[in-house]
Image (cartoon, rainbow, N blue to C red):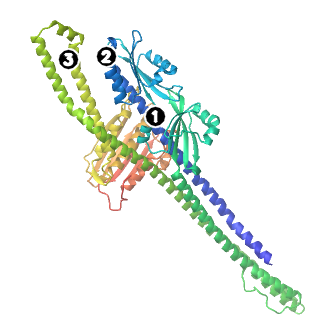
Amino acid sequence: MQSLQLKILFFTFGASLLPVLVLISVVWQLLEKPLIELEKTRLDDQVLAFRGYSSATEKGLKNLISSYANWSDLYNAVQNPNPAWIKEEVSEQLLFTTDIDIVRVIKSQNEEIIGEAGSKILALPLVQQKIQDLKNRTKLSQDLIDTGKQELVLLAGSPIYRSDGTGKPAGTLIAGQLLDRVWLTQFLNYSQPTTRVEIIALNGQRFVSSNSDGKSDIWEKNYFSVKILPSIYKKCSVYHIQPELGLNTIYAPLYSGNQPIAIIKLQIVAKYFQEAKLTLTRLIVLVLTLVLLLSILIAHFLAKQISNPIIQLAKRSKTLAAGDLNSPIPGVENGGEIGQLANAYQEMAYSLSTLINNLEKLVAQRTHELELARQTLEERVQERTLELLQKNQELEIKTEQLHTALYNLKMAESQLIQTEKMSSLGNLVAGIAHEINNPINFIYANITYIENYTQDLFNLIHQYQQRYADPEIQIYAEKIELDYLIKDLPKLIASMDTGATRIKDIISSLRNFSRHDEAEIKKVNLHEGIDSTLVLLQHRLNPLHDSPKIQVIKEYDHLPLVECYSRQINQVFMHILVNAIDAIELHKEQVDKKIIIQTKNHQNQSVTIKIIDNGIGIDEQNISQIFDPFFTTKSVGQGTGLGLTVCYQIIQKHQGNIQINSQLKQGTQVIIQLPSLLQNNIVDGAS
């Protein structure tokens, strides 16, 4: 009988523990996958930042070469060779005041090298071949090349013209910048901190590394040729998530033109991934421990309740076999099947003692007892059915709680990612705007004086021409095209004034958009935030390519100052306007592309902002999911699915609401309602 109690204990314990283990395993799989995807997103962001910095380097080199190549003084110094002037004003100026590492000036007539300065890689055959190719081109060109000496260099070449662009080119200006450790250090200063950044050649050699050792790890050596390199040639990235080592790595292609020329290796610290995984593991272990203890207690209780009556009944059955029909049967007062069995033993003893005298009465009594037993069994079945229904309801409630916890985790993940991105972006934008503001104000303020001084000099030259008609002076004036200079210089100053004004407006818009110095709740003019956002998106609204520009129609009401976190509200405007521009660009059939921005004042109690576009629209079946974290209707690589989620959180935080109405291929309308004054229960702090 002791073995029976042990078997019942093990059976009940295993039956209660097995579903819990299965459920915990499923939950672990569901929660671990988003953590890994989140870590891959962080790595992709680092690659995007690196490629953005590379593009900025290429654009800066192009602009610098273009400004020097269209310079009349350089044109004259090449046409009438003046190596000393070129060395002082071009070669040394570029090397010491910019990031340029290589400079070469070539005359077109006899391919003579008039000026040269910089790195010794100019003598390498691959570099010489690329310079010859750039020299034969008729417009500004640039290429990223592998020199074959474990160095990458960005080479650019441009024909040398006069400032007005007239005449044939006098020669070619070649400039190059090494992607060396100094360049990589500058990227790390502007990017989020990473553990390690390397540029690797396609043959496995290191071009440059942020660490001094620059050695491959064991995994990279084993999989470089069989996994990493084939993916790079397919223009795909390779992830290596290794939280046990504290580092997560991505290998991404670095392009020259449209072909991979090298490999970007970025490693970030897996601290947050480890902490999240450790917390999840501890939670599951805690739940499993509690379930084990509870299962043991339940199994012990059930085994005791079932086995004890059976043991007592077995002992009493032996006395019945010995002929003792008068002693009481244990367990008669208990309910359930054991009680019924004990009652049957009691009735059997009574029947044996009276069988001879009252057989018919005993048969009737037994029939009645069987009927009672049937009714009791039906009642027990109904009770068990009700218990199963209650258990099912409890299971549904727990499932709903798990879904709620998973949704809250996704919302927390989206808010954490967007907060980190926008905080870094806001600090960077505010810093850049502050650094550029003073020099551009200096330039803008002095252009008027330059214009006045120039006019005075022109008047003085005119006086000299009238009073001193010297033939040599007249010849020199014709040589430098004095009449043309007098006409063209005011135009150049006017162009500089226009450009400085444009830069000043952009800086003002950047500072207004970032609101770096306004981290508290303040009353702000929402129209200023919308206008600043439109200035920052001007390159999307008025593209330089053949695409038609997007017309912005403003229908502003007289709005009161609205109490809010201005930087967060500007962030909402940015997300919505970017989505509107993307939707319009996707609607290829739409000819009249426009965005309508309407504002309305509701008796100074609340305001409404409507942003309407005639883009591609949103499918009706996706409207209900548009605010879910990580949900996006854009193609892979064109969106994270966090923009509208963050907008919804910000508007809810400001005690307002946001609504989206859309029809496929007709357009989308976003309606935002905000109170003019916030209540006291707003969550303090700004992201």
Image quadrant in which you'd find residue 232: top right
Question: From this viewpoint, is residue 573 visible?
Answer: no
CB atoms of marks 2 and 3 within 8 Å? no
Q: Residues within 10 Å of mark 3 (few under 14, many from 20)?
A: some
Decide if residue 123 is on the left or right side of residue 475. Answer: right
First reached walking from the N terminus: tag 2 or tag 3: 2
Query: Label 3: which residue?
Result: 486
Spot occupied by residue 591 in the image (x, y as percentages of width and height)? 40, 30
Mark identifier at residue 162: 2
Q: Looking at this view, name the residue that lies furthest to the left.
A: 467
Q: CA distance from mark 2 to mark 3?
A: 16 Å
The answer to which of 641 and 488 lies nearer the viewer is 488
Find residue 432 and report its image quarter: top left
- State the mark number for residue 208: none
The amino acid type found where label 3 is placed reads Ile
Q: Which residue is mark 1?
A: 586
Residue 650 percent across, percent down from the top left: 39, 52
Query: Between marks 3 and 1, how big is the CA–CA gap?
Result: 49 Å
Residue 8, placed above or below residue 322: above
Q: Secondary structure at mark 1?
A: helix
Residue at x-position 62% and y-position 38%: 221
Q: Are marks 2 and 1 in contact (CB under 8 Å)?
A: no
Q: CA distance from mark 2 to mark 1?
A: 42 Å
